[in-house]
Image (cartoon, rainbow, N blue to C red):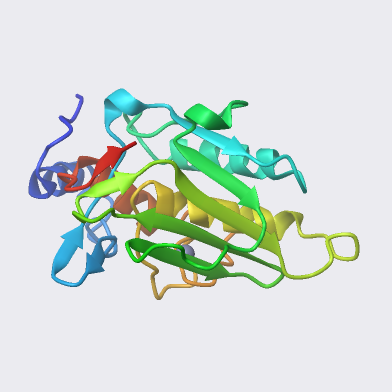
Amino acid sequence: MRFRAALPLLTLVATALACSEATSPDRVPNYEWRLVVDADTLSFHWPVNDLPVRIWVEDSLDMPSRISEGIASWRAAYLYGEYDAVVVADSTTADMIVRVRTAPAKAIATVGRLHTLFAGCEGATDIDTVATRFQLQLPVRMYLAPRYDPAQVDLTECFRVTARHELGHSLGLFRHTSDTLDIMYGQPEAAGLSQRDINTAQIVAHWPANMIPTR
Ligand SMILES: [Zn+2]
């Protein structure tokens, strides 16, 4: 069966329970993902009609490969193609821009910055909610940067984990978790997505979004 985009959470959970009840009494563990800005609780997922998300990646430190790996791991988390993305050559039409540098100082007040520190590198994803709070200004901007000299230290795994984590923010997982096994832990160290990451991503994809992507 195929879920409708606006399927309520309770229906999704109930269906998942029915499928897994025989083997797992532990329901579907997930975590809070919504971004709270003052009194507004914001939820976002990419509209199905906007897929695949077009991501332009600065060609430095093999970052296009790291982003492509991250896209593949998130794509695999979904059952019905709720998320897909491609690395594109034209930055002017991209939905996301990935720069290999430290994030600049925040330019405008509406940007919510989701910042991540990993052992040898760092990442940041800016969620620009625009003045109404219920828009997501495109392109989404992501920054990945080494914290050590990449000529001296192999940062491949560091960038792999951080890219996967930042992509999680870009597909609507706006919060950090307290479980080190989650890729969305604040200082991620997990090699891949946890079941909680996967379950939460699936819920987000079917939760009514109150943020609309805007150019
Ligand atoms: Zn983060």
In front here: 158 or 101? Answer: 101
In the picture, measured across the screen, residue 115 lies left or right of residue 212, that is: right
In front here: 61 or 207? Answer: 61
Residue shown at 44% from the left, 57% from the top: 126
Residue 7's x, y, as percent? 11, 38
Residue shown at 13% from the left, 37% from the top: 6
Can you see residue 192?
no
Can you see residue 53?
yes
Q: Looking at the figure, which quarter contains the C terminus?
A: top left
| Furthest-right residue in this view | 152
Residue 180's x, y, as percent? 49, 72
In the picture, measured across the screen, residue 84 lies left or right of residue 164, that is: left
Q: Quadrant of residue 50?
A: top left
Residue 147's x, y, as percent? 73, 70
| Furthest-bottom residue in this view | 178
In front here: 134 or 178? Answer: 134
| Furthest-front residue in this view | 107
Tally of numbered tags:
0
Q: Looking at the figure, which quarter contains the N terminus?
A: top left
